[in-house]
Image: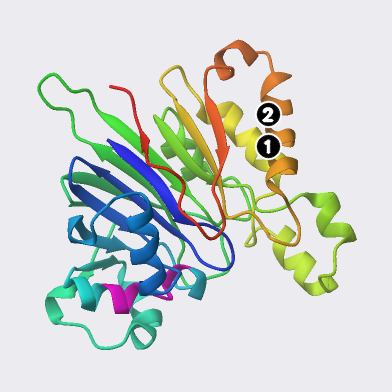
């Protein structure tokens, strides 16, 4: 099983998860052309994508969804509430491309579980993507949460013990305080329906990382209110200073690039 980010940040988000030559795309907040280019950069064929899951309706998550679905003739998976608010933005789709889902479904040979996050959208979800246990292969999971103002109980329940995590480290509080944003926008970002601060995420990671956790990808960093260096430093410091620091030392923590794809990350069996 493998995964990576194809773009990450307020300018556009896309994550791919798969195994062998079957893949599931989580969001497509960049143009279809950019998505296909970024796929080629990591030697993945667009013909291997079997569906797109939408986490919420903000443009940095759905900009290229409709275009890509039409080009590749693949289905889009979203809840009824999301279909209500994003249908006009996606353009014309064939009926079999509009897949309404509730809590769980399967795509590309993977099991997908949706759980709510806390964000200022009609509906907002994180995902737990699992490879079912097979003969001689254990169950593997990738937990995803890219937009939430707080750490929710659902996040604690579903992200704990994942083999890999793609999670939001959106802003550094000092950078936000001293930055150019107007007061109302700072309040929105800090609010329970905004985004996660670096230290907030680190507190979550203290609970989520278990013995089997291999990778943590820091995603959706703010261009104005964070940097990869600040995010990594803050999060690694909290992990290092915890009582379980030896357990955390084996986990690789990386930052998702904003515009380009990260190299494909293959989980160890």
Q: Quadrant of residue 2?
A: top left
Main SS category, magenta section: helix
User: In which quadrant will I find the N terminus?
Assistant: top left
In the picture as drawn, the residue positioned furthest to the left comes out as 135
Across and down, in percent, residue 260 comes to 50, 56
What is the spatial separation of the Cα atoms under label 1 and label 2, in whole angstroms?
A: 6 Å
Taking 248 as reference, is 190 left or right?
A: right
- Residue 49 disc label: none
The number of numbered badges drawn on the structure is 2
User: Does the magenta-highlighted stretch encompass residue 66?
Assistant: yes
Across and down, in percent, residue 226 comes to 73, 52
Q: Residue at (53%, 60%) from the top-left corner? A: 259
Q: Is residue 209 above or below residue 15?
A: above
The residue carrying mark 2 is 236
The magenta segment is 61-68
Q: Residue at (65%, 51%) from the top-left corner? A: 196
Residue 54 seen in render? no
* Circle 1/circle 2 CB separation < 8 Å: yes
263 vs 15, nearest the viewer: 263
- Regarding mark 2 in the picture, which secondary structure is present there? helix
**Colour pattern of the rendering:** rainbow
Q: Is residue 62 above or below residue 267?
A: below
53 vs 250, nearest the viewer: 250
Across and down, in percent, residue 154 comes to 47, 44
Q: Residue at (19%, 40%) from the top-left corner? A: 20
Taking 246 as reference, is 97 left or right?
A: left
Residue 187 seen in render? yes
The residue carrying mark 1 is 232
Mark 1 burial class by Cα count in 10 Å: few <14, some 14-19, many 20+? some
């Amino acid at each position: 099983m493998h995964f990576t980010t194809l773009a990450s940040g307020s300018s556009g988000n896309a994550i791919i998860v798969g195994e062998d030559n079957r893949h599931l795309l989580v969001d497509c907040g960049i143009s279809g052309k950019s998505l296909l280019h970024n796929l080629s950069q990591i030697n993945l064929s667009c013909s291997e994508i079997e569906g797109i899951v939408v986490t919420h309706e903000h443009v940095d998550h759905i900009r290229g969804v409709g275009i890509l679905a039409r080009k590749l003739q693949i289905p889009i998976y979203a809840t009824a509430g999301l279909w209500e608010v994003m249908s006009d933005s996606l353009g014309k789709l064939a009926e079999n491309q509009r897949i309404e889902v509730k809590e769980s479904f399967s795509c590309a040979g993977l099991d997908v579980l949706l759980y709510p996050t806390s964000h200022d959208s009609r509906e907002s979800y994180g995902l737990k993507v699992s490879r079912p246990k097979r003969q001689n292969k254990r169950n593997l999971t990738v937990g995803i949460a890219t937009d939430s103002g707080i750490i929710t109980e659902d996040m604690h329940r579903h992200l704990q013990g994942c083999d890999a995590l793609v999670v939001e480290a959106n802003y550094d509080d000092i950078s936000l305080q001293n930055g150019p944003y107007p007061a109302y926008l700072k309040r929105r970002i800090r609010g329970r329906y905004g985004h996660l601060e670096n230290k907030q995420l680190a507190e979550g990671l203290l609970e989520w990382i278990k013995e089997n956790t291999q990778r943590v990808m820091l995603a959706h960093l703010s261009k104005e209110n964070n940097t990869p260096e600040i995010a990594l430093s803050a999060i690694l410091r909290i992990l290092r200073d915890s009582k379980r620091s030896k357990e955390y030392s084996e986990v690789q923590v990386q930052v998702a690039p904003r515009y380009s794809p990260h190299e494909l990350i293959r989980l160890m069996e």
